[in-house]
Image: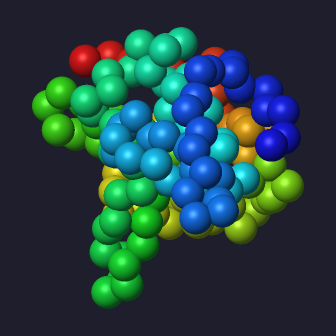
Amino acid sequence: MQQLNLPDFEYTLRKIEDKLHIFDAIRKKYLVLTPEEWVRQHVVHFLIHHLGYPKSLIKMEAGHSQNQRLKRTDILVYRSSGELFMLVECKAPEVGIQASVFEQAFQYNMHLKAEFVFLTNGLQHYCYAIHPEAAPHLLTEFPSYKV
């Protein structure tokens, strides 16, 4: 797997039916280790172990309906009150964070209404604060989790 510029973590790999799988501590199961899953697992461990985000308030690959079609977000982080704090969109390292990725995440967020949107391919990272009456604001630091 490609070296990411997110902190490394102790992960558990297992070969199942000739495919490499990684253990997902949120969903508590092994998942096929794709380049995007590699990024997703690094991000969730970064959120929990480096930024103190509560593991119990993180949802992985959550489905939601948009324009009568089922869509799936990579990572959602909630407040203890149940309000959506952050939407995270992960891409494989070889996928650049281009306009289409921004558009996808912000389309999802028009419906979900998270306070922050984080886009990453493990090498490039963009985190935006979302304000209803203003344009998204690119942050220079990752937001700390506030209960």
Q: Position of residue 9 (x, y in %)?
A: 62, 21
Q: Is residue 134 above or below residue 32?
A: above
Please state, as top left, top right, bottom left or bottom right, where the N terminus lies in the image.
top right
43 left or right, relative to 96: left
Task: Name the quadrant containing residue 2.
Answer: top right
5 left or right, relative to 53: right
Q: Is residue 2 above or below residue 68?
A: above
| Residue at x-position 66% and y-position 62% | 18
| Residue at x-position 37% and y-position 78% | 70
What is the residue that sits farthest to the left in this orientation?
81
Task: Name the quadrant containing residue 78.
Answer: top left
| Residue at x-position 32% and y-position 68% | 64
Q: Position of residue 100 (x, y in %)?
A: 71, 67
Q: Is residue 17 above or below residue 6?
A: below
Would residue 97 be seen by someone viewing this image from the given angle?
no
- How does the figure colour the protein chain or chains? rainbow
Q: Is residue 134 above or below residue 8?
A: below
Q: Nearer the viewer, residue 15 or 125?
A: 15
Please state, as top left, top right, bottom left or bottom right, where the C terminus lies in the image.
top left
